[in-house]
Image (cartoon, rainbow, N blue to C red):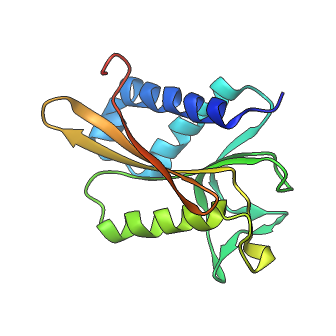
């Protein structure tokens, strides 16, 4: 059954809260995004069921290397059906606290491009319905949390803050 945008976003929020609760040590220890992405992908996949694939460190597009502006790229997490672009639901990029601000800017720009359904050249048009940039941060009073920046149609589409389960 096709997921709606609301379902995908809400299930991703639930998965992120679970990650912040169950794997707070990975976030707190500033583990790299590959480890965090693998855990988060598992939580999202569990909540979405078998209708879509949830892949981490994904670099393929129709059997070839995924590229933007001629450079090979991989995405921290994608929720999609493989080998075509009809159901690319979500592309996620993540960064832990303390990384250079330019990396946040670069990942956000990448997500704008990946959600732009009119992007040219067509070989670099991926048509993701949603993009999400997750920045893991620490509040000295409330602990670890995630700042979520959403993207849709090549543009910013909202900002929100998530704390662990039972943290709101």
The image shows residue 85, relative to residue 123, as above or below, that is above
- In this figure, what is the number of numbered marks? 0
Residue depicted at 46% across the width and 47% down the height:
158
The image shows residue 78, relative to residue 139, as above or below, that is below
Residue 11 or residue 58, whichever sits in front: 11
Q: Outermost residue toward the bottom? A: 70
In the displayed structure image, the side of residue 56 where residue 4 appears, left or right:
right
Residue 111 position within the rendered picture, expressed as x and y whole percent measured from the top left: 56, 61
Quadrant hosting residue 17: top left
Quarter of the figure with the N terminus: top right
In the displayed structure image, the side of residue 64 where residue 15 appears, left or right:
left
In the displayed structure image, the side of residue 50 where residue 163 appears, left or right:
left
Residue 9 or residue 91, whichever sits in front: 9
Residue depicted at 80% across the width and 47% down the height:
87
Residue 131 position within the rendered picture, expressed as x and y whole percent measured from the top left: 58, 52
Residue 25 or residue 69, whichever sits in front: 69
Q: Outermost residue toward the top? A: 166
Quadrant hosting residue 49: top right
Residue 30 position within the rendered picture, expressed as x and y whole percent measured from the top left: 30, 47
The image shows residue 159, relative to residue 116, as above or below, that is above
Residue 166 position within the rendered picture, expressed as x and y whole percent measured from the top left: 34, 16
């Amino acid at each position: 059954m096709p997921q709606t945008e609301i379902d995908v976003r809400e299930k991703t929020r639930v998965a992120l809260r679970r990650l912040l609760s169950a794997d707070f040590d990975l976030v707190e220890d500033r583990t790299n995004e590959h480890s965090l992405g693998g855990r988060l992908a598992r939580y999202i996949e569990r909540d979405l069921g078998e209708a879509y694939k949830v892949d981490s460190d994904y670099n393929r597009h129709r059997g070839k290397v995924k590229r933007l502006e001629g450079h090979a790229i991989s995405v921290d997490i994608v929720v999609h059906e493989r080998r075509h672009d009809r159901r690319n639901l979500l592309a996620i990029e993540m960064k832990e606290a303390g990384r250079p601000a330019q990396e946040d800017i670069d990942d956000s720009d990448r997500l704008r491009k990946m959600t732009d359904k009119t992007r040219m050249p067509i070989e670099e048009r991926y048509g993701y319905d949603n993009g999400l940039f997750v920045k893991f941060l620490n509040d000295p009073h409330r602990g670890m949390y995630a700042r979520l920046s959403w993207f849709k149609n090549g543009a910013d589409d909202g900002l929100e803050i998530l704390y662990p389960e039972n943290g709101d």
